[in-house]
Amino acid sequence: MYVCLICSAPESRRACEVRQGLADFFSTLLVAQRWGEDQSNRHAERDDEGHMRQHVRVFAWLVLFGSFAPLVSDAKTVSKPKLLVVMFDDVSTCLVGDACVDTNCVAVMHSDGSIAKQFAATDSFRAVKPSDELVTTSASVLCLHLSLAESDRKAILASVADFKASVQDASLKAMKPKTASLRTGDGEINLSRYLDGFWIAPWDAAEHIPRGITPATDGVITVVGTLDQAQDIVLPITVCGLTYGADFGLGGAGYSWIPYSNGYFFQCAAPQTFFHEWLHQVDFAYENLMGVPDLYGGVYPACGLGDPDPHRWFPSPDDCSSDPDSPACGGSCTIEFNSHVLSAHYDFSLQYVGNHCRDGRLDYGEVTVDQGGACGGVARRKAAALPMS
């Protein structure tokens, strides 16, 4: 916090820079307008129709946008988070568990909403590899083959591209994510249970991602289809995304899972879902890897009563109705909150660090700073890096 000379009052540095940019913008616009009026008067006698010459207008607009450009790009540092998007495009898993004998059951559905099979809603309900012995010993078994068509993969990558564009827009181009994509191919997989559905947790995904994660990787996002097309049965899911911070992620990076919900009437793998889940990774990294203290820690004052410097706290993307300066504070949440979290609360003078294997701190599981634990095999992982775009 410091005193902004433009308004002679305390405010955040970024707010002051924006205020200064606006002042410069309107000052330049006024000069352009006066120049245009002067040129218009000089040429009025030679303008048969009495209209301002078009080149005067063009010049004024060039000056206008020229003065506005620093507002968009004037960040002390440009962060380029490196994200690995892993598509599980051809995997098999088997749902196993006790038989449904009463009303306390979990239903696995066809895509039209009819019931394909039911399991007892107990801890026995799991998703394991087809080669697991539980497939032969469990009372109820349903094996699924989950695949992504080429059109599905293109749709996923289009959502990723839109997500990256949204981050650039929200940050005024001070943050430009770079991504690489990886396909796992055919394989068996264990899935982790969340409520009455399943997801790919970091420990489920680890063996299927042999390359691509390095200490420079700031985040991993996995995507899996939910439809067994041959049987027309959908994998049970209860949320559209789950995220772990870098402490329990992969290779020292944050980790998110987003289902490509083919077979359902809604699509989880939308651009704003990628934005939302990635912000959970940022939320962890901002305080724990980058060392930026959080004033509130999720316990907020009343709406409109937050600290004057919004960089002093970074809300979870789930805090849309409680973040005191949220446009939706006290009301209903909207997807616009993703942009608010980044644009209002991230200090863009800071270089983003999303991997604890390069944060210069001794983190959980490390033997020495940035070495050991999840950071082992650094040389091997550096050689396994994938091109980013």
Image: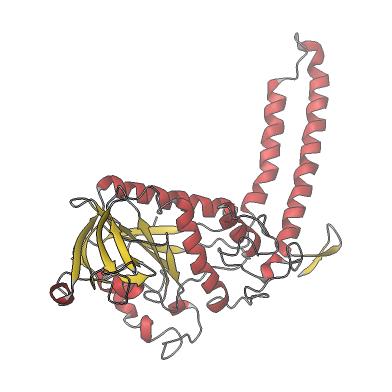
Tell me: 287 left or right of 227: right
For image coordinates 45% across by 75% down, the residue present is 246
Tell me: 37 left or right of 75: right
Q: Residue 77: horizontal and vertical position, in percent?
A: 59, 63
Tell me: 290 left or right of 89: right
Residue 244: which quarter of the image? bottom left
**Number of callouts:** 0
Q: Residue 302: horizontal and vertical position, in percent?
A: 74, 67
Q: How is the image coloured?
A: secondary structure
Q: Residue 257: horizontal and vertical position, in percent?
A: 38, 64
Residue furthest toward the top?
48
Residue 94 sits above or below residue 58 on the image? below
Say if residue 235 shows up in the picture.
no
Q: Nearer the viewer, residue 249 or 188?
A: 188
Residue 349 sits above or below residue 290 on the image? above
For image coordinates 37% across by 47% down, the residue present is 265
Q: Nearer the viewer, residue 86 or 22?
A: 86
Tell me: 318 left or right of 225: right
For image coordinates 27% across by 76% down, the residue present is 124
Q: Nearer the viewer, residue 5 or 277?
A: 277
Question: Quadrant where the N terminus lies?
Answer: bottom right
Residue 268 sits above or below residue 203 on the image? above
Q: Residue 57: horizontal and vertical position, in percent?
A: 71, 27
